[in-house]
Amino acid sequence: MTDDLQTMNQNKEARPPRGGNRASEYSYRTSKRIFDLVIGSIAFAFTLPFYPFAMLAIFLESGLPVFVELDRVSEGGIVKVYKFRSMVKNAPEMKRELLQFNERKDGPLFKMTRDPRVTKAGKWLRKLRIDEFPQVINVLQGRLALVGPRPHEPEEVAQYPEKYRVITQARGGLTGLSQVRGASLLPFIRELEFDKEYLEHQSVWLDIVILWKTFVIFFSNPTGV
């Protein structure tokens, strides 16, 4: 795993594919960052009132910590992604014991419909997607973007086929093309195909469209993104 991440860092010059010259790419990156800061600030203000209730629910059931920092790959390196803790404290250790019950057979991703690590409060936080609200802080810090490829765990990224490694050089997003086209229901390779497609056609307008679709899906089916 470490060797794979070192290789990604060494190849950082091979940026994600995007049409246009350096000037247009710089303009896009600047516009995207401003977009992330403006919309991210609004999203943070909107989600902040939910923090005390989520923190209290977690604390009353299983104590501290109420937040977790999860390792995810973004821009060729590992970043700490913030979430409200929705699992028991020893969830990483339990995962190794539960791998035999993994319902995903098409790649390195792990999924259990009735994951015993999820707490009672965590079930509600996940159902309403509140557990992911702190990730807006990652956007404001510049570690994630509002829209981008789905950031995966280092162990999962190490198993990406070579043709999709370019995805790991992009800044991961809270939502993306793969999320609005099927999310966790997609086969692993299909998800990577959508993320690569996004990088080849990314624009501020496409980001707006994806955010709008995410907004619609969130309020019609919170579990759908």
Image: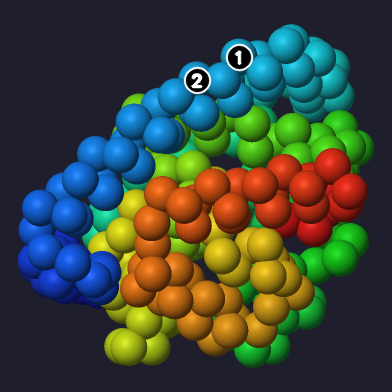
Reading the image, the residue beneath label 1 is 45
- Left/right of residue 61 with respect to residue 47 in the rendered view: right
Q: Is residue 71 visible?
A: no
Relative to residue 118, is residue 194 depicted above or below?
A: below
Residue 34 at x, y percent in the picture: 34, 31
Residue 57 at x, y percent in the picture: 84, 20
**The N terminus lies in which quarter of the figure?**
bottom left
Which residue corresponds to the image point at 50% horizontal and 20% vertical from the top-left?
Answer: 41
Q: Nearer the viewer, residue 211 or 122?
A: 211
Type of amino acid under label 1 = Ala
Mark 1–mark 2 CB contact (< 8 Å): yes
Which residue corresponds to the image point at 11% horizontal and 64% vertical from the top-left?
Answer: 21
Reading the image, the residue beneath label 2 is 41
Element type where label 1 sits in the image: helix
Relative to residue 175, is residue 17 depicted above or below?
A: below
Q: What crowding class fits label 1: few (fewer than 14 Cα within 10 Å), some (14-19), or many (20 or more)?
A: few
Q: Nearer the viewer, residue 166 or 58?
A: 166
Q: Is residue 182 visible?
A: yes
Q: Nearer the viewer, residue 33 or 191?
A: 33
Q: What crowding class fits label 2: few (fewer than 14 Cα within 10 Å), some (14-19), or many (20 or more)?
A: some
Type of amino acid under label 2 = Ser
**The C terminus lies in which quarter of the figure?**
bottom right
Q: Nearer the viewer, residue 225 or 157?
A: 225
